[in-house]
Amino acid sequence: MSAKNPNKIHKTGEDWAVDIVVYVIMAVVFLACLYPFYYSLVISFNEGIDASRGGIFFWPRKFTLENYQAVFKDENLLKAYGVTISRTLIGTVSSVLFTALFSYALSHKNLMGRRFYSMLLIISMYFGGGLIPYFILIKKIHLMNTFWVYIIPSLLSAFNAIIMMNFFRELPAELEESAKIDGANDVIIFFRIIFPISKPVLATIALFNGVGHWNAWFDSAYYVTDKGLKTVAFRLMELVNQANLTSVSGADAMSQRAGTMAAQTFTAETIRMATMIVVVVPIILVYPFLQKYFVKGIMIGSVKG
């Protein structure tokens, strides 16, 4: 006979009932969050005229790729994709590096003016100058209608800086002390010692910045008039507004941009769904590569003690 494991936990009937209720609630919440995205995916692969009749819930009734063909024939959308990818890559890398340097300096207690800079950082989280002063500032520093209006204003985030500061404060002081004994200065210490061991918090901040840049449309709408500098999120907003105004004119406009003279089977609604999928999927595919660092970076960077 095998000996019973004394450490094994025996669940009672009440424990099993609680577990079942918890799992059911989690399943309902999961489906409620996932289904809207799945529904958009199904509609994007269905013929528009057929989808307008309704009754589609789990899979396409008349499968077609015409919606995506029309989307990718839109030259403005392809240009917007290039701008968004460039913005996301450059903006994320520059913001992570700038925020890390700023936070690393503020994490040192012997920094001159540390309390003053920290106070300014906290104040910026609660107070802002407003849209009109910000617009005037962007215009005065000649960022209007330039690619750099996407990059420079987002170099530093107070929330991200606080997370990084708390992370750097948790690192052992002996790392810096031993490096200084060997003759390393602050720049060498940061890039050769601190930066490599900060992957969890760096990946977390990179994910925040990447998603923010990819989904941003406000600056593209108000600070950029050149169509060649519009972002893909702004193009999606245009299509959504177009579909809300009228499905017929929206479909006709997209048909003209697609350059097709054949009888169309798509509508503004299916075009909107296809564009939404095209915009959302790339950033979703990035998350699994950073997920293992995400929770660790948030917890280390936000909990002290």
Image (cartoon, helix red, strand yellow):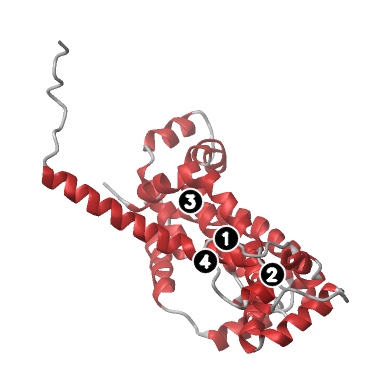
Q: Nearest to the eye among marks 3 and 2: give it.
A: 2
**Residue 57 - label:** 4
For the residue pair 296 and 137, the one nearer the viewer reads as 296
Instruction: Find residue 71 and report its horizontal and vertical position in percent.
Output: 75, 68
Q: Type of residue at label 3?
A: Thr
Dot 4, crowdedness within 10 Å: few (<14), some or many (≥20)? few
Report which residue position mark 2 lands on.
Answer: 47
Q: Are marks 3 and 4 in contact (CB under 8 Å)?
A: no
Q: Residue at point 70% right, 77% down?
A: 267
How far apart marks 1 and 2 lie (CA) works out to: 12 Å
Whichever of callouts 1 and 2 sits on the residue coming sooner in the sequence is: 2
How far apart marks 2 and 4 lie (CA) works out to: 14 Å
Report which residue position mark 1 lands on.
Answer: 59
Residue that sits furthest to the top in the current view = 1
Q: Are marks 3 and 1 in contact (CB under 8 Å)?
A: no
For the residue pair 54 and 230, the one nearer the viewer reads as 54
**Badge count:** 4
Whichever of callouts 2 and 4 sits on the residue coming sooner in the sequence is: 2
Instruction: Find residue 278 and report its horizontal and vertical position in percent.
Output: 66, 62
Q: Is residue 246 above or below residue 5?
A: below
Q: Secondary structure at mark 1?
A: loop
In the visual, does 192 lie left or right of 15? right
Q: Secondary structure at mark 2?
A: loop
Q: Is residue 177 above or below residue 249?
A: above
